[in-house]
Amino acid sequence: MSKESRLAPDETELIRKARQGDNEAFGILVERYQRRVIGVALAVVHNPDDALELAQETFVRAYENLGSFESRSSFSTWLYRIAANLAIDFRRREARHSFVRGEEAESEIDRMPSSIGDSFAEFSRAELNRRLRAALDELTPEHRAVILLREVEGLGYDEISDILQCPRGTVMSRLHYARNRLRAILKTYEQN
């Protein structure tokens, strides 16, 4: 399989044009991948505003480094790698800064359903979401990224390996650890 055969024919042409400074061609690539790039960032940072900023930064970096894209992996994998790395770095910086500032997580009251009339099912779903999000937050950024790329984005081991720039075995190991850790964390929530 040649390097170019990993890319869709129109994608190869769009990349070629974008490398030559065609902003419209790059705009088409942005439109094509924007939703998934935002999804990758959101899966790691859990904040839509931050995810949008990270997606924007991803595309800026991609545009600036388009010349270094070598077609060894798909263009989407290359973009997702940039997004995942930016999001993981962002989470690390935020964790350091919030620890230094002594910030607390949002209060239980802030997480309660907004009206008394909310159904029990809605409350249960919200509580499950809260617990799952809290459990994910207890994972390291690397473990969180691998489980979200696999379980939420539905990516394969090889693609995750390309995105996170680590061996396939490391992806499988991190995924195994993350699943077991989540299971243990959620079990303690259930017991409390």
Image (cartoon, rainbow, N blue to C red):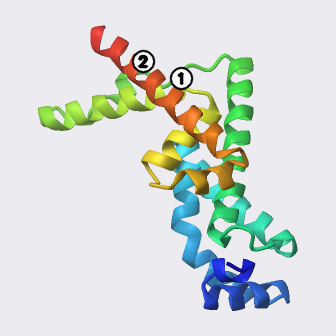
The front one of 93 and 173 is: 173
Give the amino acid type for the residue marked by disc 2 in the picture: Ile
In the rendered view, would you say 11 is above or below 62?
A: below
Element assignment for label 2: helix
Q: Residue at x 54, y 23 (%)?
A: 138
Tags 2 and 1 in contact by the CB under 8 Å rule?
yes
Q: Where does residue 175 sit, x and y in percent of width and height?
A: 52, 35
Judge whether residue 1 can be spotted in this image: yes
Give the amino acid type for the residue marked by disc 1 in the picture: Glu
Q: Which quadrant of the structure image shows residue 124?
A: top left
Judge whether residue 118 can be spotted in this image: no
The front one of 22 and 112 is: 22
Q: Residue at x 41, y 17 (%)?
A: 184
The Cα–Cα distance between marks 2 and 1, rounded to whole angstroms, is: 8 Å
Is 190 displayed left or right of 31 in the figure? left
* Quadrant of image for the C terminus: top left
Q: Which residue is mark 1?
A: 138
Q: Residues within 10 Å of mark 1 (few under 14, many from 20)?
A: some
In the rendered view, would you say 79 is above or below 31?
A: above
Q: Residue at x 73, y 49 (%)?
A: 165
Is 25 displayed left or right of 46 in the figure? right
Element assignment for label 1: loop
Residue 185, numbered label = 2
